[in-house]
Amino acid sequence: MITEGLRDFEIPDKPKFASWPCPIDISRFLNGDTVSSVDWVASTGAGVDVTALVLDDLKHTYSTTEIIPWIFSGTPGQEYIATGRVTTSSGARELYSLRWRVIQSQPIGKSVGLDAILAA
């Protein structure tokens, strides 16, 4: 689901209806340190703040080596960037970003038979 980068991570296209956590393992950047806190904000590619539109602030979590934003909704065709501001137990601070584009949900290209017909 997530493509790893150095400090920037990417999610392949996300359907508009999809809502899920996006665990990002940052242990190799911590060099033995641990995550103490993380705050998330989100913007469009143009820099417009959309934090409340695409991030569920009540569901974000983190562990000692993983940051886990919760993304949802969005506008089809729009690209979003979430930035996590991480503070470690030693007081070090770093930024990590997560980028994705929202797509319209795709219908399944198969015909479906009817089991029943509703009559008015």
Image (tube, grey):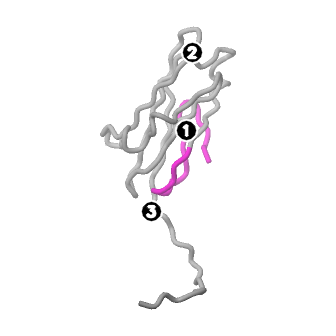
Q: Disc 1 marks which residue?
A: 9
Question: Tag on residue 104?
Answer: 3
* Residue contact between numbered discs 2 and 1, judged by CB atoms under 8 Å: no
Sequence-first disc among 1 and 3: 1
Q: CA distance from mark 1 to mark 3?
A: 22 Å
Question: Tag on residue 88?
Answer: 2
Question: Is residue 114 positioned above or below 52 on the image?
Answer: below
Quarter holding residue 114: bottom right
The kind of residue tagged 2 is Thr
Q: Residue at x 36, y 43 (%)?
A: 44
* Residue contact between numbered discs 1 and 3, judged by CB atoms under 8 Å: no
Question: Is residue 12 positioned above or below 59 on the image?
Answer: below
> Residue 27, percent across and down?
67, 25
> Residue 13, percent across and down?
51, 54
User: Magenta residues?
Assistant: 1-20
Q: Residue at x 61, y 37 (%)?
A: 23
Q: Residue at x 63, y 25 (%)?
A: 63
> Residue 91, percent across and down?
53, 9
Q: CA distance from mark 2 to mark 3?
A: 38 Å
Quarter holding residue 43: top left
Q: Which secondary structure class fits the magenta region best?
A: loop
Quarter holding residue 82: top left
For this orientation, the residue located farthest to the front is 120
